[in-house]
Amino acid sequence: MFEFSAEHLKKLPTEARDRALRLSDAVHADLGAVRQAHRRKSELYAELGALDAGRADRIARNDGIALSAGEDKEFERKREEIKTSISRFENTIPALSQNWETGSYVVDRCAEAVAAADKIVAVKPPKSPRPIDEVRRELAELLAKRETAVNAPLPKATYTAELEKALDGEAERGRVDFDPRIKGSDPFKLRSLLRSDGTATDIGAGAFLLWLFKNEIAKLLGDMIPDDGPGTLTIEERRVLIIDLDKEILELEREEEAAILIAAKDGRRIERRPDVDPQAILGIAIDGGSPLPKTAARRLVGAR
């Protein structure tokens, strides 16, 4: 889509609306640059083919006699010139395509955030943002802390409780009881667990064995759980820490966007990271300004 609908734009404050339109215009320009590069590359390949065909035609019209050294040298010069131009476009197109793909994704994320918002207010940008490299270094540090928090192990007690819960549930499926009313050979109804050929039924011998030896299995598995380390976080500690980090990250992303806009006024292009909070890009706060969920792999894109 990579554009904002009329409904999206109506929900935005004036400055944010202008930013949204500039974002869309930039994405369309990037797409135009990609198409133009592909078109020019195709034209160059056609020129190369025409040059080779012209050389062959000259030789054919000259009864197969080779061209003079001077003519042949001129053909080779033109051929290398065209091949160099083709190579230049082939090297440029991936970067142009990346610009377009990143920009269109950023616009789509912003449009989705605006569409889902109930209340949008303008937020003043930082007046004097630091250089982009400095901001992104600090961002990288916070993002690394966030990643560590997301992947931090739970306390051993939590894993143990979950283990016991899982074992209890599975073991209960394999529970058997003695039935004194059965006067035959199977008062425990073991045939409900095993077929005559020894294969498991839907209940399964595994559940039966788990019921028999649940405590032993729980100890063996519990011993595999490492003791709590310095990075251990409870679910609530992780939730609070990530909320705090996301607030800091959003503020830095607002500073990052301000630096990008200042660079643009100076004629320098700095690529946006694809997962930056849309609130930072548009200069707004949505429904109270809490950081929006991160929906893309984080990566830094350098200035050009």
Image (cartoon, grey):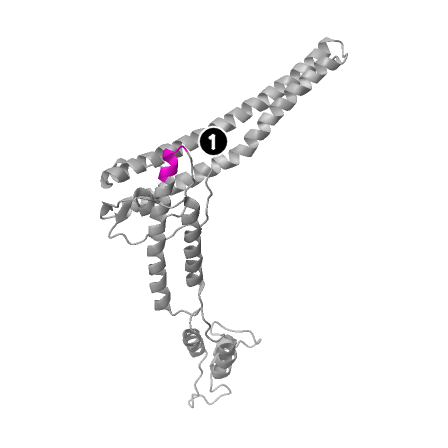
User: Which amino acid type is marked by label 1?
Assistant: Val
* Residue drawn 64% across the image and 17% down it: 51
Whether residue 1 is visible, yes or no, is: no
Query: Residue 137 at x, y = what percent?
Result: 44, 51
On the rendered structure, is 4 left or right of 215?
left
Query: Residue 3 at x, y = what percent?
Result: 34, 36
Please name whichever residue, 55 or 279, is drawn nearer the observer in this view of the structure.
279
Whether residue 156 is visible, yes or no, is: yes
Q: Secondary structure at mark 1?
A: helix
Q: Main secondary structure of the magenta part?
A: helix
Q: According to the image, label 1 marks what residue?
A: 34
- Is residue 72 shown above or below 260? above
* Residue drawn 55% across the image and 74% down it: 199
Q: Which residues are magenta?
A: 261-267
Query: Residue 241 at x, y = what percent?
Result: 36, 63
Please name whichever residue, 57 or 92, is drawn nearer the observer in this view of the structure.
92
- Is residue 38 shown above or below 229? above
